[in-house]
Amino acid sequence: MGERMQTSSAIPLLRIFSETKAKEFYIDFLGFSVDWEHRFEKNFPLYLQARRGDLVVHLTEHHGDATPGSTIFVPVIGVGELHAELTAKNYGYSKPSIQYTGWGQVLEVIDPFCNRIRFCELSGD
């Protein structure tokens, strides 16, 4: 029998249009760190990997890599703590709140490029 394919977590690609605005939102506001950055040459589009805990995203200025206005769903534990952390930063372009649903608590943030990240703490049954 042949080798079995193994998978790991998916890494979402999010389209960005400004390195400055992307870093202000993802690094300064959301608390991600940059693992690495890549450009084919100076003055070429940026492609970078950012991480916060186990959440990894790729931010890309490359046309065709991703569609602006995408949504990613991120299961979390401690959505209340995340809300308090983000609120304390007093970021001028986002004042997220927690929405209480029948299946969990959702804190949604929208980046400067209309991408949505839904941090959700699922309710126990």
Image (cartoon, rainbow, N blue to C red):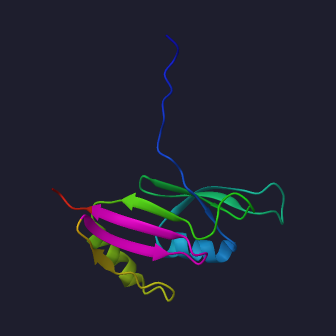
Residue farthest front in this picture: 102
| Residue pictured at 33% horizontal, 70% vertical | 106
Position above or below: 49 against 10? below
| Residue pictured at 61% horizontal, 72% vertical | 22
Position above or below: 91 against 105? below
Residue 97: percent from left, percent from top = 34, 81
57 sits left or right of 42 in the view: left
Magenta residue check for 107: yes
84 sits left or right of 25 in the view: left
Residue 96: percent from left, percent from top = 39, 81
Residue 33: percent from left, percent from top = 52, 62
Residue 68 location, quadrant = bottom right
Taking depth in this image into account, of 17 and 2 the one nearest to the observer is: 2
Residue 23: percent from left, percent from top = 60, 72
Q: Quadrant of the C terminus?
A: bottom left
29 sits left or right of 40 in the view: left
Position above or below: 37 against 17? above
* Magenta residues, dominant SS class: strand
Q: Point out the stretch of residues depicted in magenta.
A: 103-121
Taking depth in this image into account, of 1 and 28 the one nearest to the observer is: 1
